[in-house]
């Protein structure tokens, strides 16, 4: 098995090793082996595809409040600033805006180039049970 490389795997492999050692109390060598298998599985299953991984689970109420704040602050030209302020991608801010009601001073359709939401969400726990698949 070749060790997957790239920006994602350079961060993922050490993070997975730490999680396995801390959360599962694995020995370092076993954690390294499992982390590499996990990384190789992710590369094999999802390589070449766009996979959206949520930052954290948010309660729907918190997400609604955040989305409303984004819509209220949108002035028609500040997508990049809103993305930074709320810790989201510009694409996700566009998606939030496209789902909302029109606002004074801004459009609910901020960009015609935005066509679809990310294609899938990868859940590593489900991947480990053989359920993680890209839509």
Image (spheres, rainbow, N blue to C red):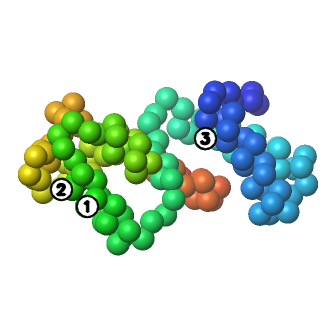
- In the image, residue 18 above or below residue 118: below
On the question of residue 88 being in view, the answer is no
Q: Is mark 2 in CB contact (under 8 Å) with mark 1? A: yes
Residue 25 drawn above or below residue 97: below
The front one of 72 and 112 is 72
Residue 64's x, y, as percent? 30, 66
- Label 3: which secondary element: helix
Q: Where residue 108 appears, x then y in whole percent?
A: 14, 48
The vertical placement of 80 against 66, above or below, is above
Per the image, label 2 sits on a secondary structure element best described as loop
Residue picked out by circle 1: 68
Q: Which mark is residue 103?
A: none
Return the disc, 2 or 1, that comes first in the chain's sequence.
1
Q: CA distance from mark 2 to mark 3?
A: 34 Å
Instruction: Give the number of the disc on residue 100.
Output: 2
Q: Are marks 1 and 3 in contact (CB under 8 Å)?
A: no
Residue 81 locus on image (x, y percent): 34, 40
CA gap between label 2 and label 1 equals 8 Å
Closer mark to the observer between disc 2 and disc 3: 2
Name the residue tied to disc 3: 42
Residue sitting at 78 percent across and 48 percent down?
A: 17
Which is more toward the observer, 7 or 132? 7
């Amino acid at each position: 098995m070749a060790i997957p490389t790239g920006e994602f795997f350079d961060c993922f492999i050490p993070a997975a090793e730490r999680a396995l050692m801390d959360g599962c109390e694995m020995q370092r060598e076993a954690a390294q082996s499992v982390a590499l298998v996990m990384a190789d599985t992710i590369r094999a299953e999802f390589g070449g595809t766009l996979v959206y991984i949520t930052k954290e689970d948010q309660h729907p109420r918190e997400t609604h409040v955040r989305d409303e704040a984004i819509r209220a602050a949108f002035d028609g030209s500040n997508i990049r600033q809103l993305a930074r302020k709320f810790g989201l991608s510009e694409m996700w801010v566009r998606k939030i805006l496209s789902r909302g009601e029109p606002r004074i001073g801004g459009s609910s359709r901020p960009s015609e180039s935005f066509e679809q939401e990310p294609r899938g969400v990868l859940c590593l726990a489900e991947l480990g049970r053989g359920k993680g698949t890209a839509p």
